[in-house]
Amino acid sequence: MFTGLIEGQGRVSAILPEGEAIRLEIDAGESIAAGLSIGDSVSINGCCLTVVELAEPVVAFQAGTETLSRTNLGRLQPGDPVNLERSLPVDGRLGGHFVQGHVDGVGKVASIDRDGDWITMWFEIPVALAKFLVPKGSVAVDGISLTVVNVEQTRFSVALIPHTLEVTTLGVRDVGDPVNIETDILGKYVERLLPFRSA
């Protein structure tokens, strides 16, 4: 479980094929890598992966075909920045919202509207995901906990403060870039339970 509060940005050091899967090596920086152990969970652009090897500050992960098909991790190149968050400790503070690290699908940046240092960013998403979004509700974009501003049939917007743009990859995203989307788990449970209530 994660909060969507990004601890820092890492950089892809290497991407090594392992059959149809990949080994993803990320320079996580000393502050994040030092707090990790083999087997720990880390959110990488919102996707929960397991640490398989440590050579501080480089941390290695494996991503299989399911992960590569449902996230933007398969599009990464060496040198690309990624958002990093270690899993939430039991006694930790929940400053964002409950983020599982289970990406629902890939969206893309539809538009970037600047207003001084602030940005309103619109994302195109599959219609199947839009039904789980509500204005003022929560969404995770590349692992970042954000508040939804507006929702339309196949897109939604968020307002990004300068701090978020500075410390996450959203500050370097361009129109057309793919992003990982995880909708709020509460909406998914409600959707699942409704048919049983009316049966």
Image: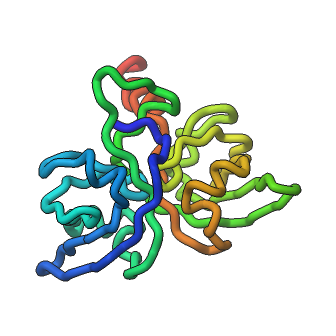
- State the image coordinates of residue 33 (x, y, percent, origin top left): 28, 54
Can see residue 152?
no
- State the image coordinates of residue 97 (x, y, percent, origin top left): 49, 31
Residue depicted at x 32% and y 76%:
13
Q: How many marks?
A: 0
Is 161 located above or below residue 138 in the figure? below
When asked about the image quadrant of residue 113, the answer is bottom right
Residue sitting farthest toward the right: 116
Side of 66 where 183 appears, left or right: right
Q: Nearer the viewer, residue 94 or 102?
A: 94
- State the image coordinates of residue 100 (x, y, percent, origin top left): 35, 40
Residue depicted at x 57% and y 54%:
167
Side of 112 where 148 appears, left or right: left
Residue depicted at x 57% and y 72%:
177
- The C terminus appears in which quarter of the rendering? top left
Can see residue 199?
yes
Residue sitting farthest toward the top: 197
Q: Nearer the viewer, residue 151 or 197?
A: 151
Is 84 located above or below residue 197 in the figure? below
Side of 60 where 116 appears, left or right: right
- State the image coordinates of residue 155 (x, y, percent, origin top left): 65, 55
- The N terminus appears in which quarter of the rendering? top left
Q: Nearer the viewer, residue 33 or 192?
A: 33
Q: How is the image coloured?
A: rainbow
Residue depicted at x 58% and y 66%:
108
